[in-house]
Amino acid sequence: MAGSDEWRCVAATVPPGQSATFRLERAGRTVHGFVVNHDGGYRAYVNCCPHVGTPLDLWPNEFFTEDGRALICSTHGAVFEPTTGRCTAGPCVGDRLTALPLVLEGETLVVRLPTETTAPPAGP
Ligand code: FES
């Protein structure tokens, strides 16, 4: 069965300080991503660390640091700002997670895979 280039989720199922993972597909290309609810807003990113390209969550859907203030890559400990995706500590300081476009349609989060010209790198 073909995958979808759009992911929808009831926003209330991702409460503050929580995350959810998803997979987008188009023309045989797959992108693994995740959405976080932080500081009153939602953000979506490709689940691919800019350091060496592994998923951030070796433990599925575990993206936040223990204090809930940042995102962390479980491979080598890079730390990212949840609102911008910018790496603030670890081996890839200054790099960024690749953001995915996310909109709130009523009570539903919607993430769509960008068109090829602006598409992020494929996740693992
Ligand atoms: S792969 Fe994420 S910090 Fe090295």
Image (cartoon, rainbow, N blue to C red):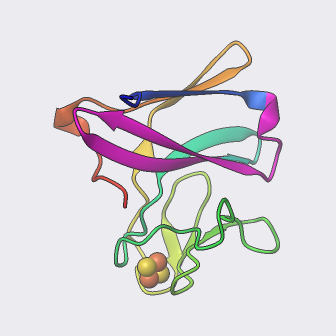
Residue beneath the point at 43% across and 69% down: 49
Instruction: Name the quarter showing ligand 1.
Output: bottom left
- Vertical relation: 77 (above or below) 37: below
The percent position of residue 3, horizontal first and vertical second, equals 40, 31
Instruction: Report if residue 16 lies within the magenta region.
Output: yes
What's the magenta region? 12-35
Q: Nearer the viewer, residue 9 or 71?
A: 9
Residue beneath the point at 60% across and 51% down: 83
Seen from this angle, which residue lies furthest top?
Answer: 106
The percent position of residue 59, horizontal first and vertical second, equals 65, 71
For the N terminus, the quadrant is top left
Seen from this angle, which residue lies furthest front?
Answer: 1
Q: Nearer the viewer, residue 26 or 85?
A: 26
In this image, 122 relative to 88: left or right? left
In this image, 96 relative to 69: left or right? left
The percent position of residue 58, horizontal first and vertical second, equals 58, 73
- The picture quadrant where one finds residue 92 is bottom left
